[in-house]
Amino acid sequence: MQFVSTRGGMAPADFCDVLLSGLAPDGGLAVPDSLPTLSGAHLEAWRPLSYPELAAEVIGLFATDIPRDDLTELCAAAYGPDAFPEPVVPLRALPGVGGLMLAGLSEGPTMAFKDLAMQFLGQAVPYVLQRTGQVLNILGATSGDTGSAAEHAFRGKEGVTVFMLSPAGRMSDIQRAQMYSIPEGNIHNIAVRGVFDDCQNLVKALNNDVEFKAAHSLGAVNSINIGRIAAQVVYYVWTWLRVGDGLVDAACEDVRIDIAVPSGNFGNIYAGHLARSMGVPIRRLILATNENNVLDEFFRTGIYRPRPAAETLATSSPSMDISKASNLERFIWQLLGAQDFPSQWAAVETSGSIDLSAHLERMEQEFGFISGTSTHADRLEAIRRVHAADGSLIDPHTADGVTVALRLLEPGVTTVVMETAQAAKFPETIAEALGSPQEQPESLLALLAMPQHVTTIPNEEAPLRQIIEEHALHGS
Ligand SMILES: *Cc1c(COP(=O)(O)O)cnc(C)c1O
């Protein structure tokens, strides 16, 4: 498989070439220039595979430039017992809740779905660096989840150092503990006296210093990374296979499922869209947003209007507090075609929005997208409802997915909600929903008690540059 830029200005490149680059040189995103088709027989042959084995098959469709034996090893390490319990992504039914099922994407070290993609990068990135004799100093800003998943994936990894900025005093106790408790010397937690936007601006400032960036081999592993997208396709295939396991007599093409995805940057659900485009029998992709509902607006009206940071609300499903969905560009490229995309997309830059209402019917009929918005009250209600049904807990992001799935459910169709985080990570909202605090798991209490490693700096470039100069790795 080869990758091109959505903006049309990049020669076709291999997976390993685009794995370490953020934006394409023309400012666009890397997209597959064509997708393979997976037949029913093909999918059926994958049914007996374990998650790591399936991962090698599915990621292998994208990473055609990594020898299969190497990829098998990388996936075995990424999805092995050090990082995930068996079976990596468990499915469970919610009997009293509209017949919904949950796919557990949050069993990894940071209890959120980002681990599934990040753990693969934690293997694939050092592998590619070693092949080319390079090093990578990851510079990122986090409000909690992504940075934590990246640090856990790259802790102790050869050829990689992580500098992660976070807003001092503005993360939850658990998020802080997950990041700051990492003892490995290649992980540098830097708390900035400011807010998340300040952290992001510092990262931007250093990235814009082209000389500094090159001299210190600075890079990122953000949500537009193609390796993360490829690794996320795996669990859509896995979910479809596992739903079908129970239906031995059905011809496999007859097993059509709806999948609901709590969404922010459109990274998770874009992977579902790729799986569906390759022939995995997913009927509808149900996109759920919280009150920051730019994406729901897009799939209902055809108008995409990103909102400025100042208009982004702080909600109780914080990882979805996003008003500019970076991966949406990839879907719109496919919707409009490579020819028409660059000229039409320019409207987002010039007028702040793009009107694709003429394509609304295709978005639903051809691509299966429908959407809805969930609010704080909806989240609390969904958490209560699941708890009342079987005593189990869901996190606030998954609750957004459950809310919208229940609203758009069609009788007779199996609907799976992607569980993107574990409830234990959000004790305040769970306590608010259920009226009393829940007991915290033993493992979490131990985590909170661990010693923490963090350097606090003022919201200024100079101290950050100094830390990077002191600790960045240098290639040979
Ligand atoms: C990142 C995240 C999301 C949003 O996923 P996108 O790929 O940005 O759409 C949803 N829930 C949780 C818990 C997350 O960490």
Image: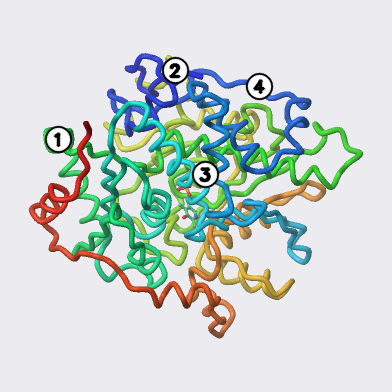
Disc 2 within 8 angstroms of ligand 1 (CB): no
Please determine whether, in this image, residue 431 is positioned above or below residue 79. Answer: below
Q: Nearer the viewer, residue 184 or 353?
A: 184
Sooner in the amino-acid sequence: mark 2 or mark 3: 3
Identify residue type, mark 1: Ala
Residue that label 4 marks: 37
Q: CA distance from mark 1 to mark 2?
A: 35 Å
How is the protein colored in the picture? Answer: rainbow
Q: Nearer the viewer, residue 334 or 430?
A: 430
Q: Nearer the viewer, residue 394 or 179?
A: 179
Residue that label 2 marks: 338
Sooner in the amino-acid sequence: mark 3 or mark 1: 1
The image quadrant that residue 175 belongs to is bottom left
Please determine whether, in this image, residue 391 is positioned above or below residue 156. Answer: below
Residue that label 1 marks: 215
Query: Foreground mark, 3 or 1?
Result: 1
